Amino acid sequence: MVKLRARCLLVGDPAVGKSALSQMFRSDGAHFQKNYSMTAGVELVVKSVNIPETSDSVELYIFDSAGRETFVEACEKLWGQPSVLCLVFDVSSELSFSNCGRWLERVRAHCQGLHIPGVLVGNKSDLSSRKEVETSVAQEWAQSQGLQYHETSAVSAPTPGHNRQAHRLLEPKCQHQVQKQYTL
């Protein structure tokens, strides 16, 4: 059994649902908090994720970063070297989607050119009547940036596929860590 550690950076505009997503992921969908205070820094969420079809697991450290510009610079100092990126936007807000490019540039500058696997998450899919960002547009942009795309709603409970999705994102990092452990 191998237990690995990975740092997941959760970024995006204010009020896109980053904290709700991280809390729902941590609780396996058992706890949706209806009222949130704006994150004013970085909140750390830790969860162990089993790697499908193995006895291995990844201890995932999710760094839920504030979306307000006034806090971002301070947050960057706490990011460290992320293993994976989760870039979140609200599907009912074209502006939050448009700002994803700025967030991605900021993370890439912080990582000094190192490739960080990641996912673009369109949150609040339950607000389909107010949807402003088409799935195909978000998928195309994500692919052009080397990101996977996933649309979800923190309001609805995560499916068992969320752990598989997390594993797919972390797989290259996990394989590297396992090889590193066995070659030392």
Image (tube, rainbow, N blue to C red):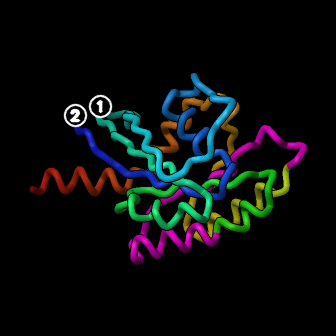
Quarter in which the C terminus is drawn: bottom left
Q: Residue at x 68, y 50 (%)?
A: 16
Q: Residue at x 49, y 53 (%)?
A: 41
Q: CA distance from mark 1 to mark 2?
A: 5 Å
Q: Position of residue 87 (x, y in %)?
A: 58, 57
Q: Position of residue 63 (x, y in %)?
A: 45, 50
Mark 1 touching mark 2, by CB under 8 A? Answer: yes
Mark 1, Cα crowd under 10 Å, few <14 / some 14-19 / many 20+, is few
Compared with residue 155, is residue 94 higher up or lower down, i.e. above or below?
below
Q: Is residue 128 left or right of residue 84?
A: right
Q: Amino acid at mark 1?
A: Ser
Quarter in which the N terminus is drawn: top left
The residue indicated by pointer 1 is 55
Q: Earlier in the sequence, mark 1 or mark 2?
A: 2
Q: Is residue 126 left or right of residue 106?
A: right
What's drawn in magenta, residue-wise? Answer: 101-130
Q: Residue at x 35, y 49 (%)?
A: 6
Q: Amino acid at mark 2?
A: Met
Per the rendering, the mark at residue 1 is 2
| Of 179 and 84, the residue lying toward us | 84
